[in-house]
Image: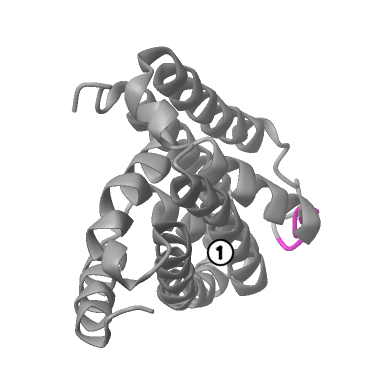
Amino acid sequence: MLNPSTLTIFIAAALALLVTPGPAVMYIVARSIDQGRLAGIVSVLGINTGALFHIAAASLGVSALLVSSALAFSAVKYLGAAYLIYLGIRTLLTPQPEVMTEAPPPQPLGQIFRQGVVVNLLNPKTALFFFAFLPQFADPARGSMTLQIFLLGCIFVGLAILSDGMYALLAGTMGGYLKRNDRFQRTQRTLSGSIYIVLGLVTAVSGSHSE
């Protein structure tokens, strides 16, 4: 159904986009440094599960609502920004253990997964990206546009899991090294919380419906 030459171009374009760190990668890196490689991989799966919802919406044309409605765009954008800021504030307010050799209680992996889903699900730029990007590589002459867009989206998510997973592994490994440093132990929670808050603020103030 998909043209092989078009698919090759799509994969090249997708990889070029994925290797450039964006908000999702920054979130994954912060989570990996904070709690290790496994938590980073789980956040990768959560982020990309959220992307699947946007892909399904794009393939059915539902994402057009975000393009045509300034109110819907603003509502989802600010909900996503508020959630990231909430994660940051909660991280900053979590008490630091008095004994530096005592590790703070880790978040359950299920909770990390759900947070990743919500972070990406409430990001309207993800919806707009898939709505604008995927249809360019679909051809009405080659069958159902809905199915083509969905397949392209699934391929994109597969590539994203590999790319984001590399970031998670590298950041998790670096985080393990840094956590053996007393100074980093004292500041890592502040760094992670600050990254979440900055991401939320950037999401809230960057872009507009007219862009």
Q: Is residue 94 above or below residue 57?
A: above
Q: Is residue 102 above or below residue 3?
A: above
Given residues 23 and 5, the one toward you in this image is 5
Given residues 106 and 205, the one toward you in this image is 205
Q: Which residue corresponds to the image point at 60% horizontal and 58% vertical from the top-left?
A: 49
Q: Which residue corresponds to the image point at 54% horizontal and 23% vertical from the top-left?
A: 79
Residue 183 relative to residue 97: left or right:
left
Quarter where residue 13 is shown: bottom left
Q: Which residue is mark 1?
A: 44
**Residue furthest out toward the top:** 71
From this viewpoint, is residue 108 visible? no
Amino acid type, mark 1: Val
Majority secondary structure of the magenta segment? loop
From this viewpoint, is residue 55 visible? yes
Quarter where residue 19 is shown: bottom left
**Residue furthest out toward the bottom:** 4
Q: Which residue corresponds to the image point at 75% horizontal and 47% vertical from the top-left?
A: 97
Magenta span contains residue 39: no
Give coordinates of residue 178: x percent, y percent.
Answer: 50, 68
Give coordinates of residue 195: x percent, y percent.
Answer: 44, 42
Give coordinates of residue 4: x percent, y percent.
Answer: 27, 86
Viewport quadrant of the N terminus: bottom left
Q: Secondary structure at mark 1?
A: helix
Give the residues drawn in magenta, as a range: 101-106
Viewport quadrant of the C terminus: top left
Q: Residues within 10 Å of mark 1 (few under 14, many from 20)?
A: many
